[in-house]
Image: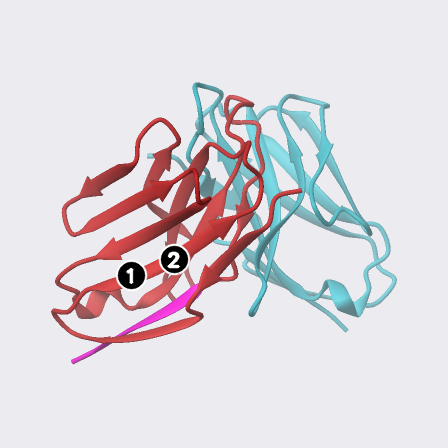
C-alpha cells in the first residue's frame, strides 16, 4: 500500500517569513495530493490540492509543487501570519476511483509562527 | 457548503461494549469514509463506502465494522470496544467525479474506552 512521509514534524518560523513542508510517497500510481490544515480542536480543512497532470498550483500565499519522478510534493506558505499556526497534513491517493479512494496521510507538521 | 455531522463530540464507553459512531452528510455524496486520528500518527483510514450497502476495508479495519443503509448516513461500529480504540474518529465524504475529489470532514468524535 501507499506510504507517505512528512517532514519536519515541527516547524517554527518568524512572522513574515516563508515555511516549507515536504512529503514523499511510495506508490507511483498515486495521482491526487491534498493538503489539510487542522487548528486545535477543529476538523481538518482542505487548503490546496494538486493532481498529477500539473507540477505546481498556487492560491494567494499558498503553493504546492509536485515532482512525480522523485515522488515528492511540498507545501509553501509565504508571508506567514499568526493565523497560519496549526498542524498541516499532506495526503496521497490514486484518485482514479472518482472520489472513492481513501487518503493516506503523513503524520503531520506542527507549524508555529513566532511574533 | 458541505455539512458532515458526527452525532457525538465526546463519548465514554467501557471495555467490551458495542459502540456506534454515526455520521450524516447533507450533500448527496456517494462516498463516505471513517478515519481515526492519534497523536504522532496522523489520520488512518478504517473503512470507506462508495454506495449504499457497499463497504471497503481501509488500512486498519481490525476490530471495526461499518453500516451504510442510507446514502447520507455511515456508521462505524466497534463490536467489542477495547482500550486501544481510544482515539479521535473522523468521518469524511466526497462526491463521485473526475481525478481526485476533496474530502470534507466532520468535527470528530473523541472516544474514550475505560
Report x, y in % for residue B90.
56, 51
Residue A31, above or below B91: above
Q: Pointer 2: what residue? A: A22
Residue A115 figure quarter: bottom left
Q: How many marks?
A: 2
Residue extent of the magenta highlight: A108-115
Left or right: B17, with B76 as reference point = right
Report x, y in % for residue A113.
23, 74
Q: Nearer the viewer, residue A65 or B39?
A: A65
Residue A85 counted in the magenta span: no
CA separation in Å, label 2 and label 1: 7 Å
Residue A77, above or below A72: below
Quadrant of the drawing holding the N terminus of chain B: top left
Residue neighbourhood size for the residue with mark 1, other residues' Cα within 10 Å, grouped as few (<14), some (14–19), many (≥20) = some
Considering every residue shown, the one lying at the far top of the view is: B97
Judge whether residue B2 can be spotted in this image: yes
For chain A, what colour was chosen?
red
Residue B42 figure quarter: bottom right
Give the main secondary structure, helix, strand or loop, of the magenta stretch: strand
Q: What color scheme is it?
A: by chain
Left or right: A86, with B59 as reference point = left
**Mark 2 in CB contact with mark 1 (< 8 angstroms):** yes
Report x, y in % for residue A101.
57, 32
Residue A110 counted in the magenta span: yes
Residue at 57 percent of width and 45 percent of height = A26
Report x, y in % for residue A111.
33, 69
Amino acid at each position: 500500500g501507499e506510504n507517505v512521509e512528512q517532514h519536519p514534524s515541527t516547524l517554527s518560523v518568524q512572522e513574515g517569513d516563508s515555511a516549507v513542508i515536504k512529503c514523499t510517497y511510495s506508490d507511483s500510481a498515486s495521482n491526487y495530493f491534498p493538503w489539510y490544515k487542522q487548528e486545535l480542536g477543529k476538523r481538518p480543512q482542505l487548503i490546496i490540492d494538486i493532481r498529477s497532470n500539473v507540477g505546481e498550483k498556487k492560491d494567494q500565499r499558498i503553493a504546492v509543487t509536485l515532482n512525480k519522478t522523485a515522488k515528492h510534493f511540498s507545501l509553501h506558505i509565504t508571508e506567514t501570519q499568526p493565523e497560519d499556526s496549526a498542524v498541516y497534513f499532506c495526503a496521497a491517493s490514486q484518485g482514479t476511483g472518482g472520489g472513492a479512494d481513501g487518503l493516506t496521510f503523513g503524520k503531520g507538521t506542527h507549524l508555529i509562527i513566532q511574533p | 457548503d458541505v455539512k458532515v455531522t458526527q452525532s457525538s463530540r465526546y463519548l465514554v464507553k467501557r471495555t467490551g461494549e458495542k459502540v456506534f459512531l454515526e455520521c450524516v452528510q447533507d450533500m448527496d455524496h456517494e462516498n463516505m469514509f471513517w478515519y481515526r486520528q492519534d497523536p504522532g500518527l496522523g489520520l488512518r483510514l478504517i473503512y470507506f463506502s462508495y454506495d449504499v450497502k457497499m463497504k471497503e476495508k481501509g488500512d486498519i479495519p481490525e476490530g471495526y465494522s461499518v453500516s451504510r443503509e442510507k446514502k447520507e448516513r455511515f456508521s462505524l461500529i466497534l463490536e467489542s470496544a477495547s482500550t486501544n480504540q481510544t482515539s479521535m474518529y473522523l468521518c469524511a465524504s466526497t462526491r463521485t467525479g473526475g481525478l481526485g475529489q476533496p474530502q470534507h470532514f466532520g468535527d470528530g468524535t473523541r472516544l474514550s474506552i475505560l
